[in-house]
Image (tube, rainbow, N blue to C red):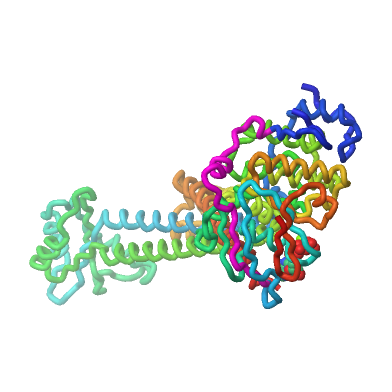
Amino acid sequence: MRANCDGGDIALPIWGRAPWGIGIAFARVGNPALIHFENVGLRYGMGPEILRDLTFDIPKRSFQFLTGPSGAGKTTLLRLLFMSLQPTRGLINMFQRDIATIPREELPLLRRRVGIVFQDFRLLDHLTTFENVALPLRVRGKEEATYRRDVLELLNWVGLGDRINVLPAVLSGGEKQRVAIARAIIDQPQLLLADEPTGNVDPPMARRLLRLFMELNRLGTAVVIATHDLSLMDQIDARRMILSQGRLDIYD
Amino acid sequence: MTSLQQKPARPTAEGADEAAEDKRASRPQLQVRAMAPIVPPANVSANALTIVIAIMAFLACLTLGAVSMIQDTAANWQSQISREITIQIKPADGLDMQDALETARETALAIPGARDAQIVGDAATARLLEPWLGDNFDIDQLPVPRLVIVTIDHSDPPDFDAMRAALAQAVPAAYLDDHRTWVDRLVSMARTTVLIGVCVLALVFIATVLTVVFATRGALTGNQHIVEVLHFVGAEARFVASQFQNHFLIIGIKGAIAGGVLAALVFLAANFWTGYAPATPESDQAMALFGAFRIGLSGFFGILAIIAVIGLLTALTTRITVIRTIREIDVVRSDPSRME
Ligand SMILES: Nc1ncnc2c1ncn2[C@@H]1O[C@H](COP(=O)(O)OP(=O)(O)OP(=O)(O)O)[C@@H](O)[C@H]1O
Ligand SMILES: [Mg+2]
C-alpha cells in the first residue's frame, strides 16, 4: 500500500481488502442509471424556482463535476440527490425506486448508500477525528472492533494518521475537509456527493483529494463533485453538469 | 507498536516529507480513546429536570404511602369491629329488661358461630354514659337502651339474618347491630381514598411525562447540529432516540431515587415519632385517624416500584418524543415550500 500523493497509482487500503458490495454486482447486470431526474423543479417557500425542469441521469460508476455560479443551486441539487429535500415537482428515481413512494422510515437505509461531504464539513466538535469518521458505521450498529482497522487505514491514507485523537477544533480547514471526506466514504457508498471538497486546501492537496475520488470511482462509486474550481475540473476529463439560472447543461 | 503521537506533527498537505509519510501510513496507530457518547451528557441540561423528577417521585411515594396506610387502617377497623356484634334492647312499657336481656343472650348463643354473649351490666352501662350524664344519675330511672355484646367466631361467623329473625321472635324490642353499616361505610371510604390516591398518582405521572417531553424537545433543539449530522450519515430515528434516551434514563433514575429516599426518610421519621411518643394527645389523634405510620416492607417496595416506574417513564417518553420530533424535523427539512 502506498500512501502516495501526486502521480502513481493510488490504492485505497480498505477496498484493497474488503470485497466491493452490491455496487459492482448491480453494475454488471444491465446498466440502469443510479439516479434519474425527470422535469424536477424546486422553489424555496414562495421564492423563484431555483431549479427548473431538470432531466438527467447519474449513471452507475460515473464521475461528474457539478458547477455553476454561486447561488445557482448546487447545494440544493446535492440535497435532492441525498433525498434530504423533496422536489417541488417532477420525478426522482434513486436506485430504481421512485422516492415519492418510499416510506419515510426507509429513507435512512437508502441514504446509507450515499456519502455526502458538506461545504461546511459538519463535524461533531466533541468527537475525535477517529470518532467522526467512524460515526456512519456506529450509526449502522457496528461494533468498534470490527471497523477500527479500516478507519485507521483510511485516516492514514488521507494523511491524518497522526491526528486521529484530536478534536476538530484543533484541525486546520484542510484537515477538517479530509475528515469530512473520510467520513463520507468510510462505508463504501454507491454514490458520493461532495460539496466544494477542495475549497479549503492548497492545489497539491486538491489534486490528491481528486485522485482519492477517482480511485473511489474506479472501485465502483458514482461521484458528483460540486465545485467552482476550474483548475480542478481541468485536471481530468470528466462529465460536467453546469447549473445556471435554474437550468442544467451537461457536457459529456 | 510505537505510538505515532510522539512523532512531530506532519505538515497539513502532502509533499513535505513523503518518505516519512509512507512509513507512518503503513503503521496504523491503534491507540484510540473509548468511544465518546454521540450526545455529550453536558449537552442535556440535567439539574432542573432532576429536581422536578425528584419532587414528582417524592409526591408519588407520599401518595402511595398514604393510600396504603389508610387502606390498612380501614382493613384493621373492619376486622376488629366484625369480631363483635351488639344486641340493643330499647326500654318499653311493660318490658322486663333483665328478662329480655337474658332471653336475647340465650337466643344469640343458640345460633352456631356465636362464641360468647355478655350482658353489659348496670354499672358498665352507667360508666358508658358517664361522659354525658355525669356520675350522679340513677340508671333505673332513665329509659336507657341496654346492650348484649356477642363475640362471634371470626372464622365461622353466624348467620346474622337467622339470628335477627330468632331475636325478633323472642324479644321484639331487640335490635341486632352487626356493624354492617359501619363496615360498609369504611369500605367505601377506603375505596374512595384509594381512587383519589390513584388519581393523584396518575396526575403526578402525567406531569412527569409532560416535563420530560418539554425537556427532551429542549435537548433536541440544543443539539440540532448533532441531529443534523446523524441524519446525513444515515441514522434512523430509533438510533437518534437511543442516544438521548440513555441520558434521560439516568436523569430519571437519579431524580426518582432522590425523591424516593426523601419519602422513605419522611416515613421513617413518622414511624419513629409514633413509636416513641405515643402518649401525647396529638399522636393519639393521629393514631386514631391513620393508624400507625407503619410503612412496612411493602411500603419500601412501593417506593422502589415508583423509582422504577418513573425511570422507565422518563426513558420511554424521551424515546417517543425524539422519534416524533425527528419525524417533524424530517418533514420540515425535506419540504422546500416551508423554507424562506
Ligand atoms: N433553506 C433555504 N431556504 C431558502 N432559500 C434557500 C435555502 N437554501 C438555499 N436557498 C437559496 O437557493 C439558492 C441556491 O442556493 P444553493 O445553496 O443551492 O447555491 P449554491 O450553488 O450551492 O451556491 P454556492 O456556490 O455559493 O455554495 C440561493 O439563492 C439561496 O439563497
Ligand atoms: Mg453551495
- Residue A243 versus residue B104: which sits nearer the camera? A243
- Residue B207 versus residue A52: which sits nearer the camera? A52
Q: Position of residue A29 (x, y in %)?
A: 52, 44
Q: Quadrant of the N terminus of chain B?
A: top right
Count of marks placed on residues: 0
Left or right for A152, reference B146: right
- Residue A114 versus residue B87: which sits nearer the camera? A114
Residue at image x 16%, y 63%?
B101
Q: Position of residue A32 (x, y in %)?
A: 55, 52
Residue B296 sits above or below residue A87 on the image: above
Q: Position of residue B261 (x, y in %)?
A: 58, 48
Highlighted range, magenta: A14-43
Would you say residue B285 sits in the magenta stretch? no
* Ligand 1's quadrant: bottom right
Furthest residue to the front? A252
Would you say residue A17 sits in the magenta stretch? yes
Would you identify the image quadrant in which residue B210 lies?
A: bottom right
Residue at image x 11%, y 65%?
B165
Left or right for A244, reference B8: left
Q: Position of residue B315 (x, y in %)?
A: 56, 52
Residue B295 visible, this orientation: no
Furthest residue to the right? B16
Would you identify the image quadrant in which residue B324 lies?
A: bottom right
Furthest residue to the top? B1
Left or right for B39, reference B174: right
Residue A32 visible, this orientation: yes
